[in-house]
Amino acid sequence: MADLGKKYCVNCLADVTNLRLRCTDCPDIELCPECFSAGAEIGNHRRWHGYQQVDGGLFSLWGPEAEGGWTSREEQSLLDAIEQYGFGNWEDMAAHVGASRTPQEVMEHYVTMYIHGNLGKACIPDNIPNRVTDHTCPSGGPLSPSLTTPLPPLDIILAEQQQLGYMPLRDDYEIEYDQDAEKLISGLSVNYDDEDVEIELKRAHVDMYVRKLRERQRRKNIARDYNLVPGFLGRDKKDKEKEKPGGLGVGGASVGAGGAGVGGGVGSASTAGAGSGPIPGTPKRKITKEEKEQRVRLRALCQFMAHREFEDFFENMHKERALRAKVRELQRYRRNGITRLEESAEYEAARHKREKRKENKSVVASKRGSSGGAGLGSGTGLGGGAGGGVAGGLGVGGGLKEDGKDGEFAAIENLAGFELLSDREKVLCNSLNLSPTRYLTVKTIIIKDHLQKRQGIPTKSRLPSYLDKVLKKRILTFLTESGWISRDAS
């Protein structure tokens, strides 16, 4: 006996209880999906008649062989959920579909059937036309949207953290720059009845606060880039002392201590330019006293330049000085008729011999002049001192050598006036860390004052301010032993 609760197709008599298509123009015409898609016509029914889908919501959209047994009602609920909650919110989508489906099942079914399945392949093209191009820069670029890139915390001990008020987990300080900046916005509140003037005033306060925050971050970046915190704690000075070789003489110790003092001053101020050392990857060179003083004068530029740019700036200035010295040397060669570099070695050898003869003549003349004076004993002492200086170098001047190589004068050989010095004067300037121009200035003033005193003209000392007592004494001793001035003048 046929089941009266079931429905059958009028064309093929198939069971259409779960899904059937009913004609709206002809009564009692219900077809299965296969006959309807084939365009079956029975009696007065035609394929262009209107139709209505009738189902119980229990049939499978993907066929009986599909995994999971998803019904059409669940499929419809899934599509409503993906539209309402968005892709990826599988927990809320599973609750919307029904308690019988877990979030994992919902995700697997949607990805398998609607993305990687035939429906997804037909609806999602391989090449999407008019795709929007991502013009944003990656993180860390010059125009990166992340304005404040997080930096690693400072590597300092607990006692130093407490001294600075530094909190490593927050990478922040207890006392900030412009500590009361938050007061600008702490009492602001936006009300619906605010007038335009009040709204603009509040916006101005917010803009002022944002500028203060940017200034805070800028100062933190400068302190981190120039390594100012270890400089403030004195750690860079300790590292320099460890790197220094032991057993320095008296003259070397005085110069080294002076250089460290200048470097420490720069590092502990608003920059660590002179105290930070050379750029990684560049050869280490000795920084002259003039360059250290120039770093101190130009340290205000550190707030506008990165540390590497600051070091490159001074490195380029050093190269410029070397090039200028080389240009002057080549111009001097050209004035003397030298057109090839091979001829310059012979010219320099002849020039050194000529200067040596002049120096020896001046020493002999000074001996004769001092021996003809009133004090014969002092003249003899002067001759002995000068002879000892010529034969064995300067005794008081820190053990200067007569025959120095060019490599010994790397700190001053590129400075102006270097070619005007004799070999012994080069050794003296190198040991005193004094530039040739300054030495020549001091030498000219001392000799001029000495000649005026011998002529009975009253003179007043006009020595430069950068000449301290130690440098003055050593230069006077050198000039006395070389015969430029008499011993009583020193």
Image (cartoon, rainbow, N blue to C red):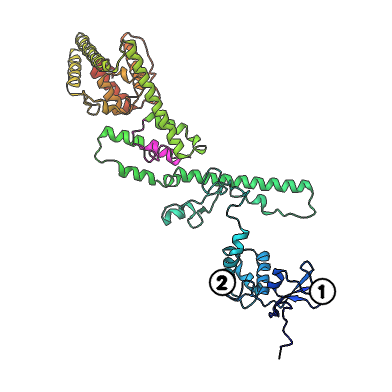
* Cα gap from disc 2 to disc 1, whole angstroms: 46 Å
Q: Residue 170: x percent and y percent?
A: 51, 56
Secondary structure at badge 2 equals: helix
Which quadrant would the C terminus be assigned to in this image? top left
Of 31 and 270, the residue lying toward us? 31
Total number of numbered labels?
Answer: 2
Q: Is residue 445 above or below residue 23?
A: above
Q: Is residue 93 above or below residue 427?
A: below
Q: Which residue is mark 1?
A: 26
Of 100 and 434, the residue lying toward us? 100
Please say if the residues under marks 2 and 1 sit with CB atoms less than 8 Å apart: no
Secondary structure at badge 1 equals: loop
Residue 451 horizontal side relative to residue 388, left or right: right
The residue carrying pointer 1 sits among few (fewer than 14), some (14 to 19) or many (20 or more) residues within 10 Å by Cα, namely some
Q: Is residue 292 above or below residue 358?
A: below
Q: Which residues are magenta?
A: 260-288
Q: Residue 102: x percent and y percent?
A: 59, 74
Secondary structure predominantly adopted by residues drawn in magenta: loop
Q: Which residue is mark 2?
A: 104
Q: Amino acid at mark 2?
A: Gln
The answer to which image quadrant residue 437 occupies is top left
